[in-house]
Amino acid sequence: MTISLNWDLASLFTGGSQSATLADFLDQIITDLNNFRPNLDPLTVQNQAEWAAQIQHLYDITTRLDHASAFVGCLVSQDVNDDKAFQLEAQSDQLWAQLGTHWTKLTALFAQQDETAWADLINNTELKHVAFNLNELRELARQKMSPELEALATELAADGYHGWNRLYNTVSGDKQVMLLGEELSLGQLQNRYEDDPDREVRRKAFELYEASWLKLAKTCAASLNNQAGFRLTLYKNRGWDSILKEPLMNNRLSRETLEAMWSTIDSKNGKLLDYLSAKAKRLGLEQLHWYDVFAPVGEVAKTFTYQEAGEFVIEAMKRFNPDIAQFCRMAIDKEWIESENRSGKRAGGFCTSFPVNGETRIFMTYNGSYNGMLTLAHELGHSYHDWVMRDLPYGASQYAMNVAETASTFNELVVNDASLRATDDPQERLSLLGAKLSNAMAMLMNIKSRFDFEMAFFERRAKQQLSVDELNELMVTAQRNAFKDSLVNYHPYFWASKLHFYITEAPFYNFPYTFGYLFSNGVYAQALSEGPAFVDRYIAMLRDTGSMDTEILAHTHLGVDLTKPEFWETALDRILGDVDTFVDLVDKMA
């Protein structure tokens, strides 16, 4: 059977961006938002049903808006010239803002209620299934300013705090440069300095990249300084004394766990210096420059059709868990994946869920490469995670960023190992191992430098704005420390070039990636150790990601304490075990 390269969206809403069904669906959401009035009397046994009905109604609106927004996101991704889809996207953003105001007012009421009455409400009604989320929202409301001030802050942030993010996106996105007679965006230029096999091309691309960000640096510094100033002022007025309070709450994580993770990484990531040294040897260098760090080594000569990639992923997953393999088969056969390599599509890949009917859709542009196959496996992991939670209420299915990569990274690890078992070719093995260790270096060194930079930046920013030179100095210091002074040169303008520093919706957009990477590796280590007996626990863990703090999730389903180094050591030892294999292979090929 021939597999379609395009996803099926018509079964969700017919007619694409011109869909009358979608228009009616959105009109009903608008009506419900306009009619919603979270004005409730103090909670008692007598009005408990009214309270439960109000909360359930807002969850229902949220579910439907999420469903419609996911569809619109698919439309704008599949065709960047669909103007109507972009209008729908703007409308969706406005509706989310209106919905957010309702939740702010409602959760402020949560915080004001008597403890006994509140406990009775969430334990003796249908709300017991979303009790974790409701308690979480209530506690957050207690730690914020008054509802009126929070609403004002949200309104001011639209053109202030988030405005600096939009300015950065505009400035960085509009920049075009010429490299060797070819016009490139800064994103394309970054790909050239990281991935081009020709070292001279990488060098020229990196020097041009740095020069380009030098020209943009003052604007970037203004954006970074001013959005940081907004956050610091907001936190001060909320009475929050730590810059990490919000990102830790967002990730349902304790600072003790975060510190345990970073300290264990710092004690073990020195092993990657052997990898960097062997890579330099393979590239004919004494020592790596920044533009050599991600350079390819070895070669995977094979290409895979989309159908072949799908079959490989399915067979690899079948060895671990037939349930995941069966799901992958279903997602491919039901045309839940947009994979066609054509112009007019957005870059990148994602998986999005449709909570009304429990389906998902995957967006990617498949190019026939090994990395393309890994992307397919990765996104199918996200899709599987949502699939096993499809019967849960909306308030119990929203998991945090730090555990969002669990199933996706798990799938990648399975496919990576299957690929290594499938080849004896030294060049292929070198390329596969190099890609794995390059990813490890990104997670354990590069992201460590981003985290350390942000911590140092906010400490200094609390006293004064920082100049471009001061930001460069902080960045290079963080990189030298994270890479253990192993490179010839560093990337002082990384703070300007990395979009993640400017994402105002998710502060400290760095450590959740490293956490998720290590957590998934720790899960995979248990899966390999326990075999089929682990399958049911794996599914149960994924289902609980939306209703447990991270430490409780790990203790309940893995029997580990994330605040202690043992779990992190196990994950790191498994990852770093590839270093000696890579070094031996380089020596044999010398």
Image (spheres, rainbow, N blue to C red):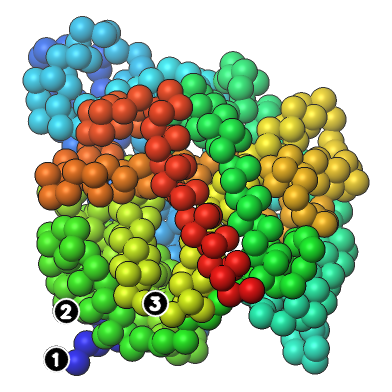
Q: Position of residue 498 (x, y in %)?
A: 67, 56
Q: Nearer the viewer, mark 3 or mark 2?
A: 3
Which residue is denoted by mark 3 in the rendering?
424
The answer to the question of whether label 2 and label 1 lie on touching residues, with beta carbons closer than 8 A, is: yes
Which residue is denoted by mark 1 in the rendering?
1
**Residue 34 can be seen, yes or no:** no
Estimate the spatial distance between the alpha carbons at disc 3 and disc 2, rounded to whole Å: 32 Å
Horizontally, residue 250 falls left or right of residue 47, namely right
Q: Residues within 10 Å of mark 1 (few under 14, many from 20)?
A: few
The amino acid type, in three-letter code, at marker 3 is Asp
Q: Nearer the viewer, mark 2 or mark 1?
A: 1
| Residue nearer the viewer, 318 or 457 | 318
Look at 19% across and 43% down and name the residue there: 530
Q: Is residue 529 above or below residue 179?
A: above
Q: Nearer the viewer, mark 3 or mark 1?
A: 3
The local secondary structure at tag 1 comes to loop
Look at 64% across and 74% down and name the residue there: 590
Q: Is residue 585 above or below residue 565?
A: below
Question: Residue 333, labelled with which disc?
Answer: 2
| Residue nearer the viewer, 34 or 277 | 277
The answer to the question of whether label 3 and label 1 lie on touching residues, with beta carbons closer than 8 A, is: no
Estimate the spatial distance between the alpha carbons at disc 3 and disc 1, rounded to whole Å: 31 Å
Label located before the other in sequence (2 or 1): 1
Label located before the other in sequence (3 or 1): 1
Estimate the spatial distance between the alpha carbons at disc 2 and disc 1, rounded to whole Å: 9 Å
Q: Is residue 75 above or below residue 482?
A: below
Look at 57% across and 29% down and name the residue there: 263
Horizontally, residue 509 falls left or right of residue 559, namely right
Q: Position of residue 46 (x, y in %)?
A: 10, 14
Q: Position of residue 461 (x, y in %)?
A: 78, 32
Q: Residues within 10 Å of mark 3 (few under 14, many from 20)?
A: few
**Residue 522 can be seen, yes or no:** yes
